Amino acid sequence: MRVLACGFLVADIVVAGLDRIAGPGEVLRVPRGIVLSVGGHPANVSVDLAKLGLPPSEIGVCGAVGQDFLGDFIVRTLEGYGLRLFIERVPASTNKNVILVVKGEDRRFHVELGASDLLRPEAIIDIVERERPEVFYLASGITDLVDRVVGHVFRRAKEAGSLTFADFVPPHGKGWDYLVPALPFIDVLHCNEAEALGLTGAGSVEEAVRWLLERGVKLVLVTRGGEGALAATERLVVEQPAFRVEVVDPTGAGDAFCAGTILALLERGLRAGDLPGLGSGELAQLLLWGQAAGAAACTAPGTTEGVSRSKVEELIGEQGRYLLSRTSVRGWGAR
């Protein structure tokens, strides 16, 4: 197994392309339809990796779903991609998310939590130690049993020889500090600006990134939507503008960014020990692949529908040189 993606799985109900939100009692027809799709960071990252060309038999998905029709839907959909599944069926409802996307506005999420809280950390550790994936990806924040021992889970993955990759959402029922014990065992951490500030309590993104690096993270990736993305190691800070595409639905863009970055790491043969010494060109290429995958995800409704290897390569071919020419690089002492 090359990648094991673990964490929360969600049934997404996406309504995109809205001109506005319906008023009380109003019936509003939706131009792009209502899409039911598999969501949750681990599922999206895994599907995106397969669509980007990584053999599905080399990708594992671990999560928990309910014993209900939406749980069946998630399992059948992921099976359809040929992924290796390690999914627990638990006595709780499958996580659900109703996503409303108004043109020109950020997404509105309406989430029901359930099965993800019952995902067992010992099940994840058993898979990691048996399969020893090259990359161990864990999305946390709404996985209660795992969140309680998240540092232990990441430590065991490191001991199994995996490059560890952390992603998360604003935590439910706990403070941001739940993730702090895991930081010494995290090689790559992805977040958006709000998550970086929430986790660290810093006053700026730069302060937040420095805080994470000082606590052991080797590579910090911060996505900024239409403003681009940042990659930072203990040596360098690399900032890159965003690809320009017609945005239909940005849902899943962050997950596609992670998938693109993971694929770039694998295709370059990079391991955890290589990350602190990466040069500016290598960091810029990681951002380019991550951002191209994220941009592709924005071009269709749903979380993964817009992603393909051909679309990513097309975007890089059309805009990559321009973005690289406007990528800024500095050391931590420079301003």
Image (spheres, grey):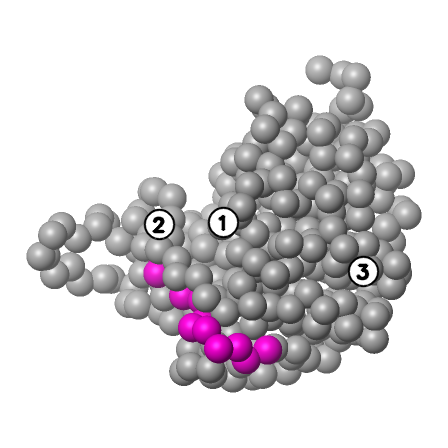
* Vertical order, 125 against 174 (above or below): below
Disc assigned to residue 195: none
Percent across and percent down for residue 62 are 64, 71
Taking depth in this image into account, of 33 and 163 the one nearest to the observer is 163
Q: Would you name the residue on which mark 1 appears?
A: 173
Amino acid carrying mark 1 in the image = Gly
Q: Which residues are magenta?
A: 88-99
Q: Are marks 1 and 3 in contact (CB under 8 Å)?
A: no
- Does residue 107 appear left or right of residue 218 in this picture? left
Residue assigned mark 2: 108
Please name the residue shown 22% across and 48% down the image. 20
Q: Secondary structure at mark 2?
A: strand
* Separation of residues labelled 2 and 1 (CA atoms): 20 Å
Instruction: Pinpoint residue 197: horizontal percent, then vertical percent.
Output: 57, 32
| Mark 1 to mark 3 CA distance (whole Å) | 25 Å
Q: Residue at x 66, y 36 (%)?
A: 230
Q: Which mark is residue 157?
A: 3
Which amino acid, mark 3?
A: Ala
Circle 2: residue type? Arg
- Residue 179: percent from the left, percent from the top? 66, 45
Alpha-carbon span between mark 3 and mark 2: 34 Å
Q: Is residue 142 magenta?
A: no
